[in-house]
Amino acid sequence: MAWQVAGLLLVGALPAVATAWWHPRSPYGGSAAGDTSEASALADGEVRLATALGWGESVLWVDARPSAEYTQQRIPGAVWLSVDDWEAGLFDVLERVPTEGWVVVYCGSQRCEASREVAERLRDEAGLERVVVLHGGWDAWKAGPR
């Protein structure tokens, strides 16, 4: 009897384990197509580059990297806004927010937290609703759309 119960538990657990492994948002694996990179899963509030590019002119790009990096190279048309120097850039961002568009915030890479902090403050303090973070950050821009 004990072996029958163990067998039933094993049979029931296999689909759950397989789903957890191959689900697109799984922290353990990737999609069923075999993409197991960390970059494959979107976190809440993130958008892929191809999606943001599809929004066309209705996007305001906000660069949350250090000002020296912004000055050196950035997404065309991007404005600079840093958590450390919030007041200096906030007016410029608010002045340019598209009426029916999106604000896409990016920083250096997927591991950078500056874009998430800026996006959160834009939502919480500035009252903007359509604010997302670019999945992969500047590295994704340099690599091009997927």
Image: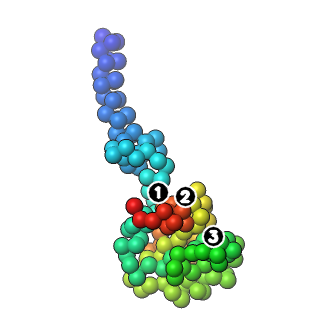
- As drawn, is 46 to the left or to the right of 117? left
- Please tell me which of labels 3 and 1 falls first in the chain: 1
Residue at the (35%, 29%) spot, across then down: 13
Asked whether the beta carbons under mark 2 and mark 1 sit within 8 Å of each other, the answer is no
Residue at the (44%, 84%) spot, across then down: 98
**68 above or below 36?**
below
Q: Quadrant of the C terminus?
A: bottom left
Indicate the secondary structure of the residue bearing disc 2: loop
Question: From mark 2 to mark 1, how far is it between C-alphas?
Answer: 10 Å
Residue at the (41%, 71%) spot, across then down: 52
**125 above or below 111?**
below
* Quarter occupied by residue 81: bottom right
Bin the neighbour count of mark 3 within 10 Å (Cα to Cα): few under 14, some 14-19, many 20 and up.
many
- Mark 2, residue position: 110
Asked whether the beta carbons under mark 2 and mark 3 sit within 8 Å of each other, the answer is no
Residue 71 visible in the picture = yes
Q: Position of residue 58 (x, y in %)?
A: 40, 81
Asked whether the beta carbons under mark 3 and mark 1 sit within 8 Å of each other, the answer is no
- As drawn, is 31 to the left or to the right of 72? left
Q: Position of residue 142 (x, y in %)?
A: 51, 66
Question: From mark 3 to mark 1, how far is it between C-alphas?
Answer: 20 Å
Q: Nearer the viewer, mark 3 or mark 1?
A: 3
- Mark 1, residue position: 43
Which amino acid type is shown beneath numbered disc 3?
Arg
- Mark 3, residue position: 65
